[in-house]
Image: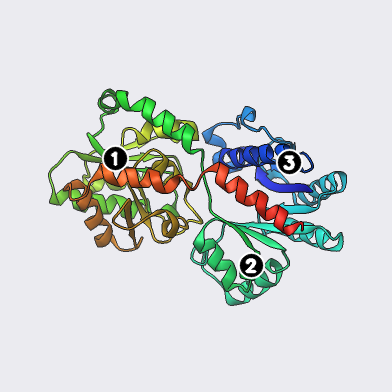
Amino acid sequence: MKILIVHNQLWAHYKAIIFNELQELIVLNKTDLLLVVQMASIEKSRVNLGNSDNSIHQYPYKLLHEGILEDVGLWQRVSGIIKAIQAFRPDIVNLTGYYDFASWAVLFYCKISSIKTILSNESTADDHARNKVKEFFKSLIIKQFDGYFNFGTLSKNYLLGLGVQPEKMLVNRNCVDNETLKNTYQNCLPKRIDRQKALNLASKNFIFVGRLIDYKNILVFLEAFGIAQSKLEGNWGVIILGDGEQKEDLQQFVKEKNIQYISFQKGVSWQQVPEYLALSNVLVLPSYSEPWGLVVNEAMACGLPVIVSEKCGCAIDLVKNGSNGFIFSPNNIEQLTTILLKFMNQEVDFKQMGQISEKIIQEYSPENVAKEMYEGYKKLNQ
């Protein structure tokens, strides 16, 4: 069996570790082969986070464009992928999207060439406003695939709603490099107090990690924290780790509302995120649109409780409300404020919640996801 995966960018480290695990399984089998076609080195929004570390890619791949994804034209994508298919002659092609003409063209080519196809789907019903006409035509395209890898329950439910057959759902989870993140986090803990002082942080902190853009809903988070802070004198603060177009507006809001202990830190590579999680106590992901939210995996791997918007794809799978964190409505400031105060008033057991996070996230490992993917490929190739 020959498997060809089409992926957007080489930079995506979290996909690299899954592809590495998949390659190890394939090598053990001896009769199967894998090739990952990477369309570009990095997408524009990730450029400030550093270049891809090519040493992490321990699987066979072909890079179509040594540059930014947005600079790769439609014809370059279509022709590059089809040439790779013609040269490799796969039994299965795994496409990581259905949203552009390139994906449609490759899907059509595979259909007429009798090559089976799998769609890796990140979308959920709530991650964008949905138009009935567009959804109808989308369902026609999506149902042409032979199998589906989903990023969780909400992702799976979205495809079921579009008419996909349940038996074609092959994978329903997403992951990060749990062990590497946990080790880095634990190595940083002894320096926690010194680093907090050096960065002028509070002794206890909520943390947001991600791009500072509108749909991340950071303004609501900061407003809720400001309200909570006004009700309780204490030593809690917020770390905002990331960059983006909203940064100046958010800083201005904090200044106008006189919210104390808010620290804006520049975005860092994924390897450095645990260094900041080690300065924190609880992760908050308040997005009103988020296909999954891998930063929640990262925080849970480090043993942190999590507060996650119900619009994040991972919420239903990773957050056990009241056990390892809380789920809230991203438009409900009062609800979020109440949850923040539970932590600030020490009404919950941080340590116990963090331990539950670690236990839950063990199932969402690169090894387990790769095994499910491999079993999916084999099932489709029968």
Residue at the (45%, 34%) spot, across then down: 181
**Number of other residues with Cα within 10 Å of mark 2, as a class: few under 14, some 14 to 19, many 20 or more:** few
Relative to 149, is 285 on the left or the right?
left
Residue 77 x/y as whole percent: 76, 49
Dividing the image into 4 quarters, which one contains the C terminus? bottom right
- Between marks 1 and 3, how big is the CA–CA gap? 43 Å
Residue at the (45%, 50%) spot, across then down: 213
Element marked by disc 3: helix
Element marked by disc 2: helix
- Between marks 2 and 1, how big is the CA–CA gap? 41 Å
Q: In the rendered view, tell whether residue 369 sits above or below residue 143.
A: above
Residue at the (49%, 35%) spot, across then down: 270
Of tags 2 and 1, which is closer to the observer? 2
- Between marks 2 and 3, how big is the CA–CA gap? 25 Å
Q: Nearer the viewer, residue 198 or 271?
A: 271
Task: Check residue 167 in the rendering and tell me which mark sits there, or answer none.
Answer: 2
- All told, the count of numbered labels is 3
Q: Nearer the viewer, residue 195 or 23?
A: 23
* Pointer 1 residue: 281
* Pointer 3 residue: 29
Q: Say which quarter of the image contains residue 191.
A: top left
Residue at the (59%, 38%) spot, across then down: 17
